[in-house]
């Protein structure tokens, strides 16, 4: 059938369309096949035959909104698979464009670039969020580069590119690739080059040193950035004969096997057409450890549940009983441990083989120290004080718990992925996930509930909250930095180990009450009351430590001993 002058017809709920230059008839082509100019239709699966072995898939698919979609929409290689199921696995397509054929608006907004939000903004500069960050975090890898987040379509690219992850070896092919979402969606390697210092021309590889870059990436990091490993990674990243990769894998080799940012299937189950989570440590926290979806609200946890489904004793997913963006976003926007560390009681190193390197505490800032004490884990020791410190990630969801907005039933999607209209007037969920000031309608999102405000008044309140919390963050940084500097002075003049140990304890406690908020990306807006309480604790603890050391220094100098 020629395409000129013809209207698109529908088959199995999917439009007959061109995908990568290949005509789709009764199914979809892989991008590889399309590039090769293949024009014969993809083989169609006998769904009942598939159900015969994949009973867990039947339970999800047979009564879902996707029940009329043939398996070949997302899979191929059926013939060879049936000949030798163990050796010849079906090919699974994870490209966003697969879902985008029916969900065009969601797809197009997801792969869009927010050009209004600048790229590569370093948090640790005099004009950014945390000007004293490097002094407080040394020698941690985050002091090499700790940039503000940007569009999700670049999640994998930015992970590979950041100076703290792979020692600077992965570089943009050129700076115009910084906003090339079309190439990034196709593959991160359309955007990046591997400037391996062991084999590349040194003129290509920048002169990075241990103090300008770090090789701190690990396999667990990648589980948020891409879904490409969903069929190659066992539950919790344990070693498994069916898993190509695990927590102890060589991360550079694993990174080369990743191609695109996390797929639609991270949050949407393709068989059940229901909301889900796939991040194993979140499922472990909610289901296996019984923390529930809302650990501080047992009643809400009963209303929003996660059903853990295990596939062939290998991997697991969690199906939500109802849509809840807070839980889906919690796959990544939480504090989690994803790296080796040490036991603060014994000093013993904790390697990636230990499950503690893939762990969600699933608590708020006030309880984080207690949880890490219980499992016996700290990330690193401060270079000056030697205080055992936690390296916090991006705890947006735990921060949101208990806030006025969360108690009112607001979810992440209401502000960051609002309902909007397309050009035809159809309402859909905006999937460009970004700060509320950049979503369509901007602060008009706030006016949906605060109907007595103008958008300008809404923005005024937001900026007022954030300005106040940023002020608290700066004061906390000042006093913790002062504590670090005073510790060095006290050590130099010979202050007793007993006093230094007390100061280290103050430092360790003040640290997480402060760093939670530079890691969290709302500048306190998600929960200003919690931010105020936490940062006030950080300021007071650090101030107490400074006074303790200054007194000891004065006594040392007075005594002359």
Image (cartoon, grey):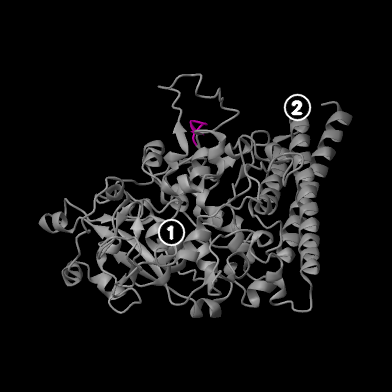
Query: Which image quarter is the N terminus in?
Result: bottom left
Q: In front: 460, or 168?
A: 460
The residue lying at 54 percent from left, 55 percent from top is 112
Identify residue for label 2: 492
Main SS, magenta residues: loop
Other-residue count near label 2 (Cα within 10 Å), few / some / many at <14 / 14–19 / ≥20: few
Residue 279: give its label.
Answer: 1
The residue lying at 64 percent from left, 64 percent from top is 440
Please tell me in which quadrant of the rendered image residue 61 appears: bottom left
Q: Do the residues labelled 1 and 2 touch (CB within 8 Å)?
A: no
Task: Report if residue 315 lies within the magenta region.
Answer: no
The residue lying at 45 percent from left, 69 percent from top is 290
What is the total number of numbered labels drawn onto the structure image? 2
Please tell me in which quadrant of the rendered image residue 424 appears: bottom right
Secondary structure beneath dot 1 equals: loop
Residue 504: give its label.
Answer: none
Would you place residue 19 above or below residue 221 in this image?
below
The x and y percentages for residue 308 are: 37, 69
The x and y percentages for residue 522 are: 68, 58
Mark 1 vs mark 2: which is more N-terminal?
Answer: 1
Would you place residue 113 above or below residue 161 in this image?
below
Magenta stretch? 166-171
The x and y percentages for residue 152 are: 53, 53
Secondary structure beneath dot 2 equals: helix
């Amino acid at each position: 059938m020629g395409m000129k002058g013809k209207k698109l017809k529908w088959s199995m709920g999917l439009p007959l369309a061109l995908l990568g230059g290949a005509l789709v008839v009764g199914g979809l082509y892989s991008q590889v096949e399309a590039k090769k100019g293949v024009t014969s239709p993809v083989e169609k699966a006998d769904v009942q035959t598939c159900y015969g072995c994949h009973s867990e898939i039947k339970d999800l698919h047979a009564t879902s909104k996707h029940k009329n979609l043939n398996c070949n929409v997302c899979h191929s290689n059926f013939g060879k698979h049936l000949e030798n199921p163990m050796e010849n696995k079906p090919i699974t397509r994870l490209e966003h464009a697969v879902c985008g054929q029916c969900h065009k608006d969601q797809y197009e907004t997801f792969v869009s670039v927010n050009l209004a939000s600048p790229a590569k903004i370093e948090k640790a500069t005099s004009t950014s969020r945390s000007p004293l960050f490097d002094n407080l975090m040394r020698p941690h890898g985050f002091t090499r580069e700790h940039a503000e987040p940007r569009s999700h379509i670049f999640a994998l690219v930015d992970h590979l590119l950041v100076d703290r992850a792979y020692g600077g070896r992965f570089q943009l092919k050129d700076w115009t690739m910084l906003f090339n979402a079309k190439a990034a969606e196709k593959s991160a390697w359309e955007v990046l080059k591997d400037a391996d210092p062991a084999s590349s021309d040194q003129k290509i590889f920048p002169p990075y040193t241990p103090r300008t870059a770090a090789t701190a990436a690990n396999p667990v990091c990648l589980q948020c950035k891409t879904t490409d490993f969903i069929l190659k990674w066992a539950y919790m990243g344990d070693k498994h004969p069916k898993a190509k990769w695990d927590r102890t894998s060589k991360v550079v080799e694993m990174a080369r096997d990743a191609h695109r940012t996390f797929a639609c299937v991270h949050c949407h189950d393709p068989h059940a057409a229901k909301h889900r989570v796939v991040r194993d440590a979140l499922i472990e926290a909610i289901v296996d450890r019984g923390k529930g979806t809302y650990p501080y609200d047992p009643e809400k946890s009963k209303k929003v549940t996660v059903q853990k489904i295990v596939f062939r004793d290998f991997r697991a997913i969690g199906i939500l009983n109802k849509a809840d963006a807070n839980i889906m976003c919690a796959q990544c926007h939480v504090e989690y441990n994803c790296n080796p560390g040490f036991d603060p009681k014994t000093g013993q190193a904790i390697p990636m083989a230990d499950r503690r390197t893939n762990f969600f505490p699933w608590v708020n800032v006030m309880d984080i120290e207690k949880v890490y004490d219980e499992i016996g884990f700290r990330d690193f020791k401060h270079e000056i004080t030697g205080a055992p410190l936690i390296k916090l990630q991006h705890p947006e969801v735990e921060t949101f718990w208990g806030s006025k907005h969360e108690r009112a039933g607001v979810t992440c999607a209401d502000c960051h992925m609002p309902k909007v209209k397309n050009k035809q007037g159809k309402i859909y969920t905006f999937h460009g996930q970004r700060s509320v000031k950049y979503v369509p309608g901007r602060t008009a999102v706030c006016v949906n509930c605060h109907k007595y405000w103008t958008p300008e008044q809404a923005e005024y309140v937001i900026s007022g909250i954030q300005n106040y919390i940023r002020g608290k963050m700066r004061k906390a940084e000042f006093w913790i930095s002062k504590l670090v500097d005073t510790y060095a002075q006290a050590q130099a003049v010979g202050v007793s180990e007993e006093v230094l140990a007390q100061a280290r304890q103050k430092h360790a406690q003040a640290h997480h009450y402060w760093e939670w908020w530079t890691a969290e990306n709302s500048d306190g807006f998600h929960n200003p009351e919690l931010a105020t309480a936490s940062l006030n604790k950080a300021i007071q603890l650090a101030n107490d430590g400074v006074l303790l050391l200054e007194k000891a220094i004065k006594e040392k100098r007075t005594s002359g001993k």
